[in-house]
Amino acid sequence: EALARGQLFIEYQPQVDLATRCIVGVEALLRWQHPVYGRIDPGRFIPLAEETGMIVPIGDWVLRTACAQNRAWRDAGLPGVKTAVNLSARQLRHPDFAARVLEIVQGEALPRGCVDLEITEGILIDDLDANRQVMGALRAAGVLVSIDDFGPGYSSLNYLSELPVDILKMDGLFVRRLGGSARARPYAIAEAIVAMAHRLELKVIAECVETLEQLGDLGAMRCDEAQGYLFHRPLLAEQVGALLARQADQQAALAPA
Ligand code: C2E
Ligand code: MG
Ligand code: MG
């Protein structure tokens, strides 16, 4: 009903390149504005949508809407960004999942590397052989795959060498503990995650970056990108458009005449 009545919308959280400080990506985050109950926490309604299978049509809508928005920013002449979309196990298991993703991505004529599918490690490992095939087909077509919330829980380093992915998203749990001494254990763990990812030729995006101290540590570790309240909260598409326009103006001002 929420989908049919237009109560769902997407906020986009910018992802910042730590070397250039430019916005290079956004993560699409699903929102539900209920007419009576107000905003409903995705942590409450997404698990329900997964249980009932509604996440399949909803997830389709998120991907379609997020790709169309990426196209709209490009058509407005704004700097191109990649758009990350979160996936559920139910979507991945759907038989024609890869074909549907490619139909949407190619329908918007987005360049390679502009759509990034975020999947948690548990979901990828759950049916590794089948997922490897699906992910392989998508990556061959230029779609990026990220491991979301990497690190806590039962992450198995054993699988990391086998997972067909491009990006590792370091869980906020690790980021939250940064900003202390560089000799402290949390620093060592985060640094090791970045180093390992780079050795595997994966990029690292740090989630939930809230303080300058955390940012300083992540920069020292050569983490590639970051997102979090320190930079931007999840924003409406128009707000992201305004940020990208400002970024383009600043770049034009810096460019040699
Ligand atoms: P996630 O993919 O790990 O998304 C990151 C969450 O961290 C978002 O919560 C975001 O608002 C929050 N966040 C970002 N920066 C900061 C920060 O600096 N500090 C703190 N404390 N939090 C920060 P949100 O929007 O509540 O989303 C929760 C989860 O719901 C997401 O976790 C994702 O797993 C899921 N989700 C969101 N949209 C979708 C969707 O379209 N499809 C599916 N399947 N899942 C989705
Ligand atoms: Mg995510
Ligand atoms: Mg995450």
Image (tube, rainbow, N blue to C red):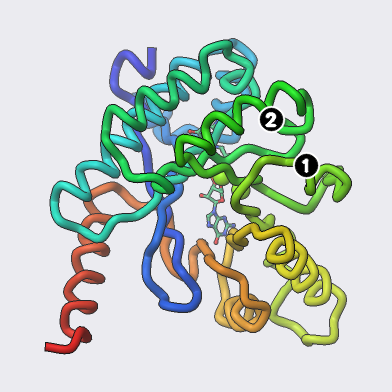
From the viewer's perspective, tell me whether residue 182 is left or right of residue 52: right
Q: Position of residue 91 (x, y in %)?
A: 57, 20
Compared to residue 137, the image places residue 213 above or below, namely below
Residue 236 x %, y %: 30, 48
Query: Residue sitting at 78 percent across and 87 percent down?
Result: 181
> Which residue bears the numbered disc 2?
132
Q: Quadrant of residue 242?
A: bottom left
Where does the image place residue 162, in percent across and percent down from the top left?
Answer: 78, 42
Give left or right: position of 183 versus 209.
Answer: right
Instruction: Name the residue nearer the viewer: 152 or 106.
Output: 106
148 relative to 194, above or below: above
- Mark 1: give few (<14), some (14-19) or many (20+) Cα within 10 Å: few
Label number found at residue 162 = 1
Please provide percent x and percent y for residue 228.
52, 62
Question: Quadrant location of the N terminus?
Answer: top left
Judging from the image, what secondary structure is the residue with disc 1 in?
loop
Q: Is residue 87 above or below residue 222?
A: above
Say whether marks 1 and 2 touch (CB < 8 Å).
yes
Which numbered tag is attached to residue 105? none
Between residue 213 and residue 69, name the one nearer to us. 69
Give the amino acid at mark 2: Arg
* Residue drawn at the location 67% of the way across and 78% of the way down: 221
Q: How many marks?
A: 2
- Label 1 vs 2, first from the N-terminus: 2
The disc labelled 1 sits on which kind of residue? Glu
Q: Quadrant of the C terminus?
A: bottom left
Could you give the CA–CA distance between mark 1 and mark 2, rounded to whole angstroms?
9 Å
Please tell me which residue is depicted at 78% across the width and 47% down the height of the picture: 160
Report the residue at 58% width, 13% height from top: 94
